[in-house]
Image (cartoon, rainbow, N blue to C red):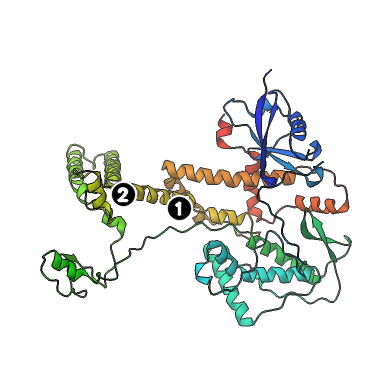
């Protein structure tokens, strides 16, 4: 019997390879083949195979997972660090990093580094660097709470005025860009405590520095309890997803003035001398053949300049004539159905006219690019060398509008999955969101983009929740037991989000359910 090829992806080490098994083989046999083929020889009990957002069971068959021969057979492999029998695959492009002394408060890998105040790069900050700057206050509070929890020395405090300014920046960013109410627990001072409370010590797990308890029976102090609450909020704020990028706005650039040798060029062409150009007059069309724009009036956007108004006039008149004929033969007053049909017909025809006007190529010699006439002459004397400039612009605008409409409300929903004290949406918010999504997703491009964004978010949540709920392997020492118990703890989320997670774990993808 012929074998089938499966592609195994190892994301943790940027490594992939192929294995060949029988179609009737089980997942357990696939793991044995992976242990024999993969570099490092990972043991079977330490392997976990994930396919389409769910972990595969050992008793499942290959032919039951991929029923169609046209489907791509790809599985993702996760290996426990203690399950490697040899050296794991080396990540391509990895370079050894120089060792340095551990700081007093260790830097966690999932936290952003503190920003560097440099005036030379302040104007060129990208979105991620700007987020680090505005969330510096949250990072300071996070480190203070971490120092209070572990009974270490707190970092040096900053001036009151500087701290207040950073707090206002962080609050404005959280409330405006992520639509989340500012948690007041971050601003509350930590209570003083004389007792030692719970003691922690440093430990290294998988090459990363962590804290662990020295004695599990110790009772925490009020200061440590308050610090743990602050850490629960700061972790969520520092791990917020980036907001969707704003719609780009094209700003027309005006020429600063005429070239200095314009008068000499006019004399060489035997044209009359140019007089002074006034910029403060009204209704100035052209002066000696040179077009002048009013200095105090806003420039016309390039989208309106490229819109072919003349190409829409005649089809619009024809549409008006057809509507008048329909109104003459069909009386909308007697039957409202006729009025609704005529209205839909008018809207559909107008939308078709606008689309044809946006796709219309500009006439020869009137492109916005200065090199278009030269290219038209080089292409031929018939004037067909002008490049279509309006088609890329129309497609770009349509894609941007589809992306904006498809991502409506996703930032608020993703924030509700991470911040524990997010209030439930009101009835007006639900009604507005339902109406806007119902109308917006009628367009196929918006529907497909919205579906892709939701599939990506739901697949990530389904993988994380199933990995947390599945029984873990028996730990070998107390250190791994503490790490396993910590991974099984539920994430801090609002109570009203639980129903959404239950539906998400109970249902599969829509297209898979239809099959």
Point out the image quarter for the N terminus: top right
Q: Give the image location of residue 221, x and y in percent.
A: 82, 70
Q: Which mark is residue 404?
A: 1
Q: Nearer the viewer, residue 23 or 321?
A: 23
Q: Is residue 508 above or below residue 261?
A: above
C-beta proximity under 8 Å, tags 2 and 1: no
- Please report whichever mark, 2 or 1, sits nearer to the chain's N-terminal start: 2
Q: Secondary structure at mark 2?
A: helix
Residue 250 rendering spot, x and y as whole percentages? 37, 60
Q: Which mark is residue 371?
A: none
Q: Is residue 188 visible?
A: yes
Q: x, y percentage for residue 209?
A: 77, 60
Q: Tag 1: Cα neighbours inside 10 Å, few (<14), some, or many (≥20)? A: some
Separation of marks 2 and 1 at Cα, in angstroms = 21 Å
Residue at screen point 19% across, 50% down: 310
Q: Residue furthest front?
A: 268
| x and y percentages locating residue 92 in the rendered image | 66, 47
Is 276 situated left or right of 74 in this image?
left
Q: Nearer the viewer, residue 121 or 459?
A: 121
State the mark number for residue 390.
2
The residue located at (27%, 39%) in the rendering is 338
Quadrant into which the C terminus falls? top right
Residue 308 position (above or below residue 331): below
């Amino acid at each position: 019997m012929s074998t089938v090829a499966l592609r195994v992806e190892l994301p943790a080490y940027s490594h992939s390879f192929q294995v060949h098994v029988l179609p009737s083989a089980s997942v357990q046999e696939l793991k044995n083949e992976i242990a024999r083929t993969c570099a490092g020889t990972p043991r079977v009990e330490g392997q976990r195979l994930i396919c389409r957002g769910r972990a595969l069971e050992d008793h499942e068959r290959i032919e039951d997972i991929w029923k169609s021969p046209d489907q791509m057979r790809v599985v993702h492999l996760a290996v426990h660090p203690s399950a490697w029998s040899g050296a794991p695959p080396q990540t391509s492009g990895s370079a050894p990093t120089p060792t340095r002394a551990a700081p007093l408060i260790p830097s966690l890998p999932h936290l952003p580094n503190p920003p560097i105040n440099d005036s030379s790069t302040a104007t060129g900050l990208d979105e991620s660097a700007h987020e680090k700057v505005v969330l510096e206050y949250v990072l300071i509070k996070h480190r203070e709470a971490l120092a209070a929890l572990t009974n270490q020395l707190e970092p040096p405090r900053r001036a009151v005025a500087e701290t207040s300014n950073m707090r206002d920046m962080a609050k404005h960013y959280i409330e405006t860009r992520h639509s989340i109410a500012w948690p007041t627990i971050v601003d509350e001072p930590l209570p003083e405590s004389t007792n030692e409370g719970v003691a922690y010590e440093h430990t290294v797990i998988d090459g990363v520095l962590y804290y662990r308890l020295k004695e599990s029976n110790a009772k925490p102090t009020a200061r440590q309890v308050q610090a743990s609450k602050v850490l629960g909020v700061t972790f969520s704020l520092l791990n917020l997803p980036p907001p969707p990028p704003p719609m780009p706005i094209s700003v027309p650039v005006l020429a600063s003035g005429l070239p200095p040798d314009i008068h000499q060029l006019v004399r060489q062409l035997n044209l009359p001398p140019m007089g002074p150009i006034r910029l403060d007059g009204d209704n100035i069309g052209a002066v000696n053949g040179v077009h002048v724009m009013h200095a105090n009036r806003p420039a016309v956007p390039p989208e309106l300049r490229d819109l072919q108004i003349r190409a829409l006039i005649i089809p619009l008149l024809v549409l008006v004539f057809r509507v008048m004929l329909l109104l003459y033969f069909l009386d909308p007053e007697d039957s409202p159905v006729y009025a609704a049909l005529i209205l839909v017909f008018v809207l559909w025809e107008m939308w078709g006219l606008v689309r044809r006007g946006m796709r219309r190529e500009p006439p020869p010699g009137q492109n916005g690019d200065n090199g278009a006439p030269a290219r038209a002459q080089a292409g031929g004397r018939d004037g067909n060398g002008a490049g279509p400039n309006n088609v890329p612009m129309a497609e770009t605008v349509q894609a941007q509008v589809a992306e904006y409409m498809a991502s409506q409300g996703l930032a608020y929903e993703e924030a509700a999955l991470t911040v524990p004290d997010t209030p439930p949406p009101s009835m007006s918010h639900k009604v507005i969101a339902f109406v806007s999504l119902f109308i917006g997703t009628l367009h196929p491009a918006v529907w497909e983009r919205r579906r892709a964004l939701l599939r990506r978010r739901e697949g990530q949540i389904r993988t994380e929740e199933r990995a947390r709920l599945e029984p873990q392997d028996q730990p070998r020492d107390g250190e791994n037991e503490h790490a396993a118990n910590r991974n099984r703890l539920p994430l801090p989320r609002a109570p009203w989000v639980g129903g959404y997670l239950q539906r998400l774990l109970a249902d599969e993808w829509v297209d898979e359910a239809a099959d």
